Image (spheres, helix red, strand yellow):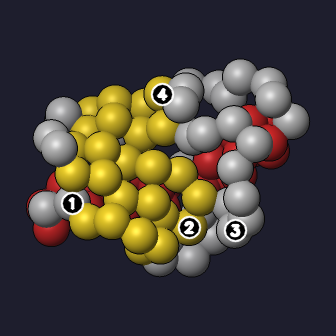
């Protein structure tokens, strides 16, 4: 699971050869969530509301980069790092 960004204790990652729809994973403490890239809809899991809000803000700023990384990971290529939430 390549880590593509980290901020405020939140780790953002993509898995290689993942199923559709395009999504990423966010981990905070012991909690995990999978979020669809295009709609920013939570697919599964749960993280605290404040952390989820930060993840959604970050994802909305980087949707294009996330989709590019999704395609790289699906092709078994390492995804690029994405700037953290400032």
Instruction: Place residue 29 in its image quadrant.
Output: top left
Crowding at dot 4, Cα within 10 Å, few <14 / some 14-19 / many 20+, comes out as some
Q: Which residue is mark 3?
A: 21
Identify the residue at horizontal 45%, vertical 60% (top origin): 34
Residue 3, numbered label: 4
Instruction: Place residue 55 in its image quadrant.
Output: bottom left
Residue 36, numbered label: 2
Q: Who comes first in sequence, dot 1 or dot 3?
A: 3
- Can you give x and y, in whole percent of width and height, for residue 74 in the image? 80, 42
User: Compared with residue 1, is residue 68 higher up or lower down, i.e. above or below?
Assistant: below
- Can you give x and y, in whole percent of width and height, for residue 77 in the image? 80, 25
- Can you give x and y, in whole percent of width and height, for residue 45 in the image? 33, 65
Q: Who comes first in sequence, dot 4 or dot 3?
A: 4
SS of the residue under disc 1 = loop
User: Compared with residue 57, is residue 78 higher up or lower down, i.e. above or below?
Assistant: above
Q: Who comes first in sequence, dot 1 or dot 4?
A: 4
Q: Which residue is mark 1?
A: 47
Identify the residue at horizontal 13%, vertical 62% (top origin): 48
SS of the residue under disc 2 = strand
* Residue 63 in the figure: left or right of residue 53: right
Crowding at dot 2, Cα within 10 Å, few <14 / some 14-19 / many 20+, comes out as some
């Amino acid at each position: 699971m390549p880590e593509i960004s980290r901020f405020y204790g939140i780790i953002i990652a993509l898995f290689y050869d993942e199923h559709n729809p395009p999504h990423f994973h966010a981990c905070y403490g012991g909690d995990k969530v999978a979020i669809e890239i295009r709609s920013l809809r939570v697919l599964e899991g749960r993280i605290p509301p404040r952390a989820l809000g930060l993840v959604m803000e970050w994802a909305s700023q980087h949707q294009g980069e996330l989709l590019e990384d999704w395609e790289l990971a699906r092709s078994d290529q390492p995804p690029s790092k994405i700037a953290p939430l400032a």
